[in-house]
Amino acid sequence: MRIGIFGKGRLGSAIALEAQAAPDLDLAWVLGPEGVPTPVDLAIDASVAGAVDGHLAWALETGADLVIGTTGWALPGLEGRIGSRIGVLAAPNFSLAVALMARLSTVLGRFAALDGTLDPYVLEHHHRLKADAPSGTARRLAEAVLAGMPGKSAWTLGAPGPGELGIAVIRAGAEFGSHTVGLDGPAETLTLAHQARSRAVFAQGALRAARWLRGRRGLCTFDDYAREILDPLFGDLP
């Protein structure tokens, strides 16, 4: 599969290293904002939020599938715009372990809903240069918790109000990415935690998602890919 990468930053560079070592992939280009892409089978967007719209337009024009790993962007009407013309997979995080953590976070939310003394929260820590806060992963985990708690309808950055789930953010140092979903009660606490030790885990996940997306059409998420792997893990549980 011939691929291209939009973005020469931390994630784009990590994906490029993994792609160059993959025998089934042909890396055609890695472009910054000044580059002009040539036709490929699939492109991975690891650039900046403001560039996503233009990259999507290029993919629709050329027929290339697109994996979007950029965070902090929003394109209204995205699913209708894509239709069945190409395959697009959008994800704030390409770690399969984080996808599992999101599923478990919904269970934590359901458990918290049984006991009003348990307060759920999300905490995330990234390096000082990360632009968006909270991260896309933190928002995804918060939404997963809320899916299990009918009494809470939204997340908020900082101290939560009635019916809200609080997200705390740290921007310091060189942390690749650390996320915690917790329950805090007067008699006990329970936490789920994930810490990335390198960007390789995200790069490898992005390429797995790219291979999975090829041949599909419409808008997908990393959870759609992860579901095929995670569902069997829960199938025989009582």
Image: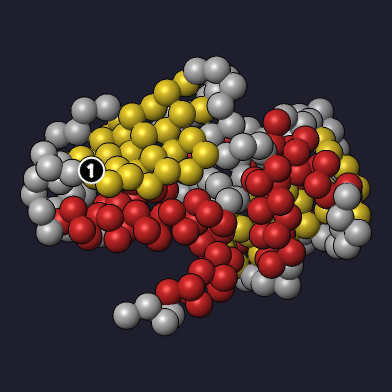
Q: Nearer the viewer, residue 118 or 74?
A: 118
Estimate how packed mark 1 is, as few (under 14), some (14 to 19) or many (20 or more) residues with alpha carbons within 10 Å: few
Check the image and report above or below for 118 versus 209.
above
Q: Nearer the viewer, residue 164 or 119?
A: 119
Q: Is residue 83 visible?
A: no
Q: How is the image coloured?
A: secondary structure
Residue at left offset 22%, top offset 60% = 110
Task: Tell me which amino acid carries mark 1.
Answer: Thr
User: Along the horizontal axis of the image, is 236 left or right of 82?
Assistant: left
Q: Which percent across, then down, holds residue 7?
A: 74, 35
User: Dot 1 corresponds to which residue?
Assistant: 189
Q: Secondary structure at mark 1?
A: strand
User: Along the horizontal axis of the image, is 190 left or right of 198?
Assistant: left
Residue at left offset 77%, top offset 31% = 8
Instruction: Identify the image quadrant of the C terminus.
Output: bottom left
Q: Which percent across, then down, holds residue 220?
A: 56, 63
Check the image and report above or below for 114 versus 143.
below
Name which quarter of the figure residue 167 lies in.
Answer: top left
Q: Nearer the viewer, residue 176 or 27?
A: 176
Name which quarter of the figure residue 210 lies in.
Answer: bottom right
Q: Nearer the viewer, residue 128 or 163?
A: 128
Q: Which percent across, then down, holds residue 89?
A: 61, 58
User: Along the horizontal axis of the image, is 229 left or right of 28?
Assistant: left
Q: How many marks?
A: 1
Residue at left offset 70%, top offset 60% = 208
Q: Residue furthest left?
A: 116
Q: Is residue 102 visible?
A: yes
Instruction: Identify the image quadrant of the N terminus.
Output: bottom right
Check the image and report above or below for 162 versus 1.
above
Check the image and report above or below for 217 versus 16.
below
Q: Which percent across, then down, holds residue 97?
A: 53, 54
